[in-house]
Image (spheres, helix red, strand yellow):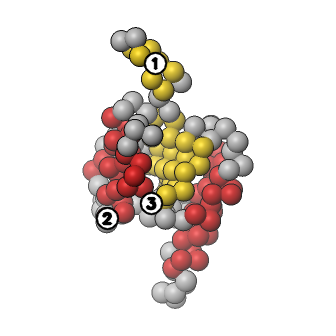
């Protein structure tokens, strides 16, 4: 969507962020900060995750700053305290499949920590997929 204001044309984007588990930690803080920064620039940001405990999370994920949708809570986080990475890949693949099949187009899809989902997300031809660890994304290229 394009808006004009004060003689300048600015682009407001529909952005999704896919993150494996949205609890409380450094990576999660970064995700929340990026979502808040993008929202403060007028973009519509939606976070997708496989885990989000509303009683143990950052306030911005429950106060409506950026909506959070959870897919795949039925999928295990580990198998007998092993295979954490494999389970994370499977959970993120499930999230990506849900986003591709169930959501309207996002102009930008940011993926965090799990790049195995990038080929699936690229099936959404109308979206730019950015695989990343997100620190550099708060600059002018996205905002």
| Label whose residue precedes the other's in the sequence (3 or 2) | 2
Disc 1 designates what residue?
Answer: 9
Q: Residues within 10 Å of mark 3 (few under 14, many from 20)?
A: some
In the picture as drawn, the residue positioned furthest to the left comes out as 59
Name the one closer to the observer, 138 or 64.
Answer: 138
Instruction: Say few, some or many: other residues with alpha carbon within 10 Å of mark 1 (under 14 / 14 to 19 / 20 or more).
Output: few
Residue 26, which numbered label?
Answer: 2
Q: Are dots 3 and 2 in contact, CB under 8 Å? A: no
Residue farthest top in this picture: 7
Q: Nearer the viewer, mark 1 or mark 2?
A: 1
In the rendered structure, the answer to whether residue 19 lies left or right of residue 87 reads left
| Quarter of the image where the C terminus is located | top left
Instruction: Provide residue 6's location: percent of width, then percent of height.
Output: 36, 12
Q: Which sits earlier in the primary sequence, circle 1 or circle 2? A: 1
Name the residue beneath numbered marker 3. 133
Q: Is residue 25 visible?
A: yes
Distance between mark 1 and mark 3 Cα atoms: 29 Å
């Amino acid at each position: 969507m394009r808006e004009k204001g004060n003689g300048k044309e600015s682009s407001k984007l529909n952005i999704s962020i896919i993150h494996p588990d949205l609890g409380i930690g450094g990576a999660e803080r970064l995700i929340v900060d990026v979502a808040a920064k993008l929202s403060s620039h007028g973009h519509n940001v939606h976070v997708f995750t496989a885990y989000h405990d509303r009683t143990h999370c950052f306030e911005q994920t429950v106060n409506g700053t950026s909506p959070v949708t959870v897919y795949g809570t039925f999928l295990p986080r580990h198998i007998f305290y092993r295979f954490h990475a494999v389970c994370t890949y499977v959970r993120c693949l499930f999230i990506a499949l849900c986003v591709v099949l169930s959501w309207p187009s996002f102009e930008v899809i940011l993926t965090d920590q799990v790049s195995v989902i990038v080929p699936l997300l690229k099936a959404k031809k109308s979206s730019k997929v950015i695989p990343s660890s997100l620190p550099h994304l708060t600059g002018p290229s996205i905002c």
